[in-house]
Image (cartoon, coloured by chain):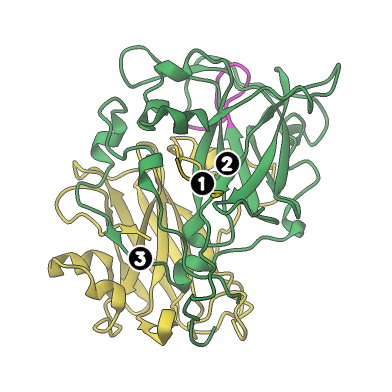
Amino acid sequence: MNDLGPLVPRNRDIHPVPYDPGYKTSITRSPNLPLLSMESTPSEETGPRFGHSLIGPLDNNLILNFTKGEAPAVGERILVHGRVLDEFARPVPNTLVEIWQANAGGRYRHVKDTYFAPLDPNFGGCGRTLTDENGHYEFLTIRPGAYPWPNRANDWRPMHIHMSVFGHSFGQRLITQIYFEGDPLIDRCPIAATVKDRAQLDRLVAPLDMAKARPMDFLAYKFDVVLRGRRQTMFENKMEGM
Amino acid sequence: MTQPLNTLQETPSQTAGPYVHIGCVPSFAGLGGIYPEDLALSPISEGAKGEIIEIKGSVYDGTGWTMRDAMMESWQADAAGLYPGQEGADPAVSGFCRFTAAIDSGEFTLRTVKPGAVKGRGGVLMAPHISVWIVARGINIGLNTRIYFEDEDNSADPLLARIEQRPRVDTLIAKKVAPGQYHWDIRLQGEGETVFLDL
């Protein structure tokens, strides 16, 4: 395969706590017992790869992909772009990035979402793309709306886009959320608050990026993602038969 | 003061939320047509070598309630124990599957080929297993675990050997209920809690 070693052990201090009473659903969905620590094996170091043939021309354009280019979605037009890197700052090329989000009114196109903000007939809410050889990705979409959710009596989600990233190893798999610079609801959100280190939460807040905005068309936000890296030293044990 | 480390930290996880299906299995969310089909509906294609099996089960929360909104991903070797991309691997095994708890019953089904034993670091054989990753509303960082098989020799598996409380080993072992049919549940918390991995 290659001469990379095991995955760098996950630093769970930067991640959200699994059990957080402020986010009620986590109370019954978080393990009580310690996780079993292990060094990664080929089962975690290998992972699915996806080819360019998977990706349709409008897959990363959420403004147009639901209507196949017929009619644009309602909302504030934005470009979300960034790079996927590993912990050694190496770009992660040709990896699948998927996003999903609510529409401009804060409503998801999902059988289980009953919020009375209306569906946009021109907006589906999902997109996908592969990073290029330098790890870059981009999506054209609309800025999702904030919305209320059943948790404490009056909780609202800040504007956010969900993002799923694969990397090249099954053990790198990551799902996170992109928040937007300046949103006052971030500080009030129990889900954002599951990340206890404020400096780490700030890493989920995408800054406005006027250098990538297109005049008279769309604003831009930058969001870089870091996946776990794999050790590489001349002292690494080689895997037999690999 | 010291020199700066030129390494980065992983991006923090956030819950996949209740609408994970929109992004990952859109047809489940009632959202068809953007992609020709959902990604990775099957880990195998026609002609995959080996025994075709089905693993069924449910995901339970800490109250024993069956979750209806979990999404799972699986990753596995082919019948010879080779992962896709490795030399000689079965081209009909992509190895990767997404499957969900059913919206009404909560039951999931993984139809695949039974994997072979896999060589780990240092040539140690790992008993046949499937890696599984679980995300859902209320799960703040995806949970990793493995499925082993009741009818395989698991006695020398290096991961299972490291589980101190031996009865907990059973949480990773799919029970054979009929030829080619296995049952395996995921319990997130409490009695019978599944062994989850920090890998």
Instruction: Please identify the quarter of the rendering in which residue A78 is found.
Output: top right
Relative height, residue B110 to residue A184 (above, below): below
Is tag 1's residue or tag 2's residue first in the polypeptide sequence? 1
Q: Using the numbered discs, state the Cα–Cα distance from disc 3 to disc 1 in whole angstroms.
A: 40 Å
Chain letter belonging to callout 2: B
**In which quadrant of the rendered image does the C terminus of chain A lie?**
bottom right
Q: Is residue A106 magenta?
A: yes
Magenta highlight range = A101-111
Is tag 3's residue or tag 1's residue first in the polypeptide sequence? 1
Q: Which residue is mark 3?
A: B146
Callout 2: SS: helix
**In which quadrant of the rendered image does the N terminus of chain A lie?**
bottom right
Q: Is residue B117 visible?
A: no
Frontmost of labels 3 and 2 is 3
Q: Is residue A136 left or right of residue B172?
A: right
Q: Using the numbered discs, state the Cα–Cα distance from disc 3 to disc 2 in whole angstroms.
A: 24 Å
- Residue that appears at 32% across and 28% down: A23
Chain with colour yellow in the figure:
B
Q: Residues within 10 Å of mark 3 (few under 14, many from 20)?
A: many
Magenta span dominant secondary structure: loop
Q: Which residue is mark 2?
A: B23
- Residue that appears at 50% across and 43% down: A175
Chain with colour green in the figure:
A
Callout 1: SS: loop
Q: Which residue is mark 1?
A: B3
Q: Using the numbered discs, state the Cα–Cα distance from disc 1 to disc 2 in whole angstroms.
A: 41 Å
Q: Amino acid at mark 3?
A: Arg
